Image: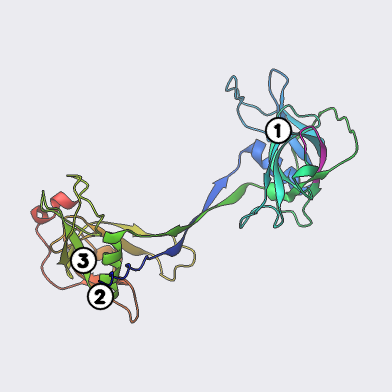
């Protein structure tokens, strides 16, 4: 007997990314502006320790810290780890060491990249210095990396008023996660159905609830689900939010509405964008149907069907 062919294993690269914008207090503002000006600042605690990078509150006493101190751009490696395969967005594109460096005049270590020809060239206790970026904007990347240094600079920390022209008052910190997603059997069937402009869930053999998207097991009963059930295409808006901030790389004008939609026959609401209606007219109970674009692998958005709104009691358990 010829064995059945193995099912196709679906895989897709996925990226979760968002920029986090934050304002800076006086200490962090002085530190980052100082880097732009090739000056490394720390902060002195009441106990006399100099912390680099500086913090705004003493980690031991929680007292507010404002006594800024300039330290040297040279220092000593306290510990390190070799990075043989740099990833996207890391400081160097060639293999390098991640190192904790205690700058001369500081009592704590700063984490950054150390440019070295190989792991044999790195050791705890080695002397290094800052390699400044050619273009600096007031961020930690103004330190391009550390590099080996033969000198023995001894630097006594000196006071600094933290005053610079055009101080940096805020930063944008990107957060990004790259990974490969491989759906299981249940979600593979769900994705295959979407390719045919159908939505399929799975019914629990115990509680009889239909879950969309299917998870392969009932989250309530903990038993495997096998029975496939086509749901929709129509559904009901159970709750929603109005989006007023435009997402990067998303060609949708704000404001728009993103909603939980309970498809007919489903016992779990899924997410979807609502279109074809002014954003301020979207409401709970609104009856909607999917809109597919040519070649689309999932509904582009949901639009009103024109039916009367669903009664609250028909969807209150799906909120």
**Relative height, residue 117 to residue 234 (above, below):** above
Residue situated furthest top in the rendering? 47
**Relative height, residue 220 to residue 287 (above, below):** above
Q: Which residue is mark 3?
A: 200
Write down the region rendered in magenta.
Answer: 123-130
The answer to which of 304 and 281 lies nearer the viewer is 304
Q: Residue at x 40, y 66 (%)?
A: 254
In the image: residue 299, left or right of residue 138? left
Q: Earlier in the sequence, mark 1 or mark 3?
A: 1
Residue 91 located within the stretch drawn in magenta: no
In the image: residue 16, left or right of residue 207? right
Q: Residue at x 62, y 56 (%)?
A: 89
Q: Which residue is mark 1?
A: 109
Helix, strand or loop status at disc 1: loop
CA distance for labels 1 and 3? 55 Å
Q: Which residue is mark 2?
A: 197
Residue situated furthest right in the rendering? 151
CA distance for labels 2 and 3? 10 Å
Q: Residue at x 85, y 27 (%)?
A: 156
């Amino acid at each position: 007997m010829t064995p059945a062919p193995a099912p196709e294993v679906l895989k897709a690269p996925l990226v979760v990314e968002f920029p986090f914008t934050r304002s800076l207090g006086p200490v962090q503002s002085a530190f980052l502006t100082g880097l732009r000006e090739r000056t490394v600042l720390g902060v002195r605690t009441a106990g006399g320790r100099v912390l680099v990078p500086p913090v705004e509150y003493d980690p031991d006493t929680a007292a507010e810290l404002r006594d800024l101190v300039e330290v040297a751009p040279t220092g000593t490696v306290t510990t390190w780890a070799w990075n043989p395969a740099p990833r996207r967005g890391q400081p160097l594109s060639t293999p390098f060491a991640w190192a904790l460096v205690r700058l001369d005049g500081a009592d704590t270590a700063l984490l950054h990249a150390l440019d070295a020809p190989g792991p044999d060239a790195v050791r705890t206790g080695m002397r290094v210095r800052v390699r400044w970026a050619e273009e600096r904007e007031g961020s930690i990347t103004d330190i391009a990396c550390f590099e080996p240094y033969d000198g023995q600079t001894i630097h006594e920390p000196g006071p600094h008023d933290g005053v610079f022209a055009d101080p940096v008052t805020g930063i944008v910190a990107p957060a990004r996660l790259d990974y490969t997603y491989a759906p299981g059997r249940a979600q593979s069937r769900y994705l295959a159905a979407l390719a045919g402009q159908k939505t399929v869930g799975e019914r629990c053999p115990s509680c009889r609830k239909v879950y969309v998207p299917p998870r392969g097991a009932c989250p309530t009963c903990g038993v495997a689900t096998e029975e496939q059930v086509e749901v929709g295409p129509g559904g009901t808006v159970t709750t929603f939010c109005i989006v007023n901030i435009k997402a990067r790389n998303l060609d949708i004008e704000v404001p728009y509405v993103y909603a939980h939609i309970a498809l007919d026959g489903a016992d779990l609401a899924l997410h979807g964008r609502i279109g074809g209606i002014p954003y301020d007219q979207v409401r709970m109970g609104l009856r909607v149907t999917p809109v597919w674009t040519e070649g689309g692998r999932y509904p582009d958005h949901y639009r009103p069907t024109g039916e009367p709104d669903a009664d609250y009691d028909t969807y209150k358990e799906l909120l």
